[in-house]
Image (cartoon, rainbow, N blue to C red):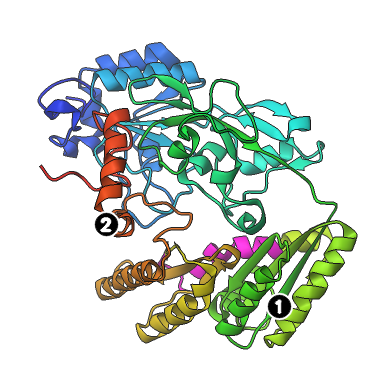
Amino acid sequence: MLHGLTVGRGLLSHGRCFLQCRHLGSNPAARSAAPDSVISAFRSICGEECISLSEAVRNQHGKDESIHRCQPPDVVVFPRCVEEVSALAKVCHNHNLPIIPFGTGTGLEGGVGAVKGGVCFSLRNMDQVLDLHQEDFDVTVEPGVTRKALNSYLRDTGLWFPVDPGADASLCGMAATSASGTNAVRYGTMRENVLNLEVVLADGTVIHTAGKGRRPRKTSAGYNLTNLFVGSEGTLGIITKTTLRLYGVPEAMVSAVCSFPSVQAAVDSTVQILQAGVPIARIEFLDDLMIEACNRFSSLSYPVSPTLFLEFHGSEQSLKEQVHTTEDITQSNGGADFQWATDTEDRNRLWKARHDAWYAALALRPGCKAYATDVCVPLSRLPQIIVETKEDLIQNRITGPIAGHVGDGNFHCLIVVDPSDQEEQHRVHLFTERLARRALAMDGTCTGEHGVGLGKRTLLCEEMGPMAIQVMQGLKDTLDPKNLMNPGKILLPIEL
């Protein structure tokens, strides 16, 4: 039997997804000899070339950039339009098959693993920029469009989309995980920049969260369905279009790097810059170990000490004021070696080094794996949590350079761990639990931008409390009563 692709004893009743025969999910031979009525239905919808049972393709679509084990789907489909997505979802719904949306696979919490088998909907063929309204500062894109592709499309319009998580993620995937990144301190996260979504629900129904074709800058009409799906990580539906806010390209941009004598001094400067009302676009913190890693990996020569990467957007005159205020604040906290980057090439080189921090951390211990933590706290608690986290890393002999979008209280430890060392992995696990609970104790969150996925479901329960989780489960049950949409993510399984 092709695991899960025919109705039978391999499926549990009431749509709770199949668990029996899971071992067949990695056996191509079992697949080729099995009845394939569902595969035939898929092929009739989107053609032979848009269906794959290849083990290599399935493995590719069962993992992201996280440390969670690859769990491949049973089949991968590549729809080309929302009508095909809807038709394929109806087949899955009729046969109780889990559906796992897949964008570019750049997630960090195991959000695309097929923990109960099923069908991966790879959306890369839906890659059109559909509607650009320059005068209204908005655009609608399909899920195969990445942020770099959109900004390339916009390059002659004087507009850009500033939400930048580092990876060249798909924009609908960024909406699904409520991504943010280096520019969030000024331009906000995906939650503030999504105006409307087209979503295919588990039964194939197509909805528009703000009304079909609607794109107002604000609304008071009804429930906020758009932000219900932003951050839902594929557990409520498949996002097939997103309408986004755009911004005018700033007249001028200036970037800078400044080193500090301590973590406390650097983070204090961050808080004071924001308290002074400087409309800074990016303010990133790297600790001494992260700077050392970036120096090695990107052939730089910055002082090996806690460092801020900053960027200012605006008019020439406004930039002078911003820079002057920022310099005064950093100098009062012992900041030194202020290095400026004004032309595009130098700025791009600086921020590429910051975006390559993941690979720079990995290079500290060749042959090891990286695990990125992600917490966020109120700004006033930021100095304390980073100092305590740094001490925790040192005391527990963990290689974990720190990099963060400290302008909005969000930071990461890029932990490098030997996958063959069980004792080290245990120490890392305990550290990440302490870090998340440290953030919760400071009125923060266990994830500022990576999402919950597989790794933080228990922490979400602690953060939100039982009543809020009950409401979430009720929404899930209403929109997806068979639990087919990306099962096993965000919410812990219900005890039967």
What is the three-letter code of the residue carrying label 2? Thr
Say which quadrant the N terminus sits in: top left
Number of the label disc, if any, that sits on residue 258: 1
Residue 122 visible, this angle: no
Direction from residue 211 to residue 157 in the image, left or right? right
Quarter of the image for residue 229 reads top left
Label 1 secondary element: strand
Tell me, yes or no, whether the highlighted magenta stretch contains residue 467: no
Picture quadrant of residue 320: bottom right
* Whole-percent x, y for residue 101 in the image: 41, 34
Residue at (66%, 43%) from the top-left corner?
A: 148
Residue under pointer 2: 458
Can see residue 24? yes
Q: What are the residue bounds of the magenta stretch?
A: 350-370
Q: Residue at x 13, y 30 (%)?
A: 12
Residue found at x 59% / y 47%: 168
> As displayed, is residue 138 above or below residue 411?
above
- Mark closest to the chain's N terminus, 1 or 2: 1
